[in-house]
Image (cartoon, rainbow, N blue to C red):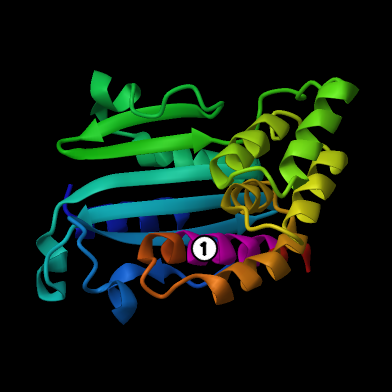
Amino acid sequence: MKLHEARARLEDCFGGVEEGAPRLHEPDDARFASRPHAVWLEYRWYVQARGLAEVYLKWERVSPERFSDAEATVLRVHLMGASSELAERARRMLVGGGPASDRLRGLFGDDGARREQVAFGRTHVTLEHWEPAGPRPLLEEAEFEALKRALWSPDTTPAERQAVVQELARERSPRVVEALLGVLEHHPSLMSLRVLSEWGEVRAQAPLQRALAAVHPDNLAELWVLLSLDRRLRAWARMAR
């Protein structure tokens, strides 16, 4: 699927739906023009009711004048929140696709998201449902307190803190939200920002802005992630107005 065909498919499926934040289009930002990547990236955020459809588009890294005929390699939609209309529109992305390869189906591992995947030639199209099908069980009180202590401890390494956040995020609850917001007052935690932005916790905007101000200009990979999380939170905030 060519890039212009992928964009046309997006317009067919999501045309008329409000975008909750400006698109993040990598070629438009000079900071990312020279990073050693084999692809270009673009994000979009469609909002409706209490739902968010985050679109991730990847295509081969060619000069802008060749974008129209560039090959789109990945088209992915992350469904968050609750919107039956967005879910229905996102499913249209899959219509007409062939079976996904075994390599693609095994790429993500067991991260809790439910995926529907097809292929259009070399283009992989994936619909990811990030909301759990049912309620998440609560952690035992002793386990929660132990994880919280490890999360906030100054002796915890960044890698250990990331693992602790992932364990805590098995429980989606106000106490976990407060724990993640609390650690961001004292320690950097990209995983905490990821989880809070996925859950639509707009109070994470302030620590995210601090993280953006602190990131080194040469750390383009982390800068890109933080910018995408910022736009995601802006989209959630727009729905909350």
Residue 10 vs 219, above or below: the answer is above
In the rendered image, the quadrant that contains the C terminus is bottom right
Of residues 67 and 191, which is closer to you in this image? 191
Residue 149 vs 225, above or below: the answer is above
Residue at (36% x, 69% y) in the render: 25
Of residues 183 and 14, which is closer to you in this image? 183
Where residue 173 appears, x then y in whole percent?
82, 37
Q: Secondary structure at mark 1?
A: helix
Q: Residue furthest front?
A: 155
Other-residue count near label 1 (Cα within 10 Å), few / some / many at <14 / 14–19 / ≥20? many
25 left or right, relative to 191: left
Q: Quadrant of residue 127?
A: top left
Of residues 98 and 71, which is closer to you in this image? 71
Of residues 30 and 167, which is closer to you in this image? 167
Q: Quadrant of residue 129?
A: top right
Residue at (70% x, 52% y) in the render: 200
Residue at (39% x, 44% y) in the render: 76
The residue labelled by disc 1 is: 226
Residue stretch rendered in magenta on the structure: 225-236
Where residue 13 appears, x then y in whole percent?
42, 50
177 left or right, relative to 3: right
Asked whether residue 127 is drawn in magenta, I would say: no
Where residue 122 appears, x then y in whole percent?
16, 38
Asked whether residue 232 is drawn in magenta, I would say: yes
The answer to whether residue 112 of the structure is visible from this angle is yes
| Secondary structure mainly formed by the magenta segment | helix
The answer to whether residue 29 of the structure is visible from this angle is no
140 left or right, relative to 104: right
Residue at (55% x, 66% y) in the render: 231
65 left or right, relative to 180: left
Name which residue type carries label 1: Leu
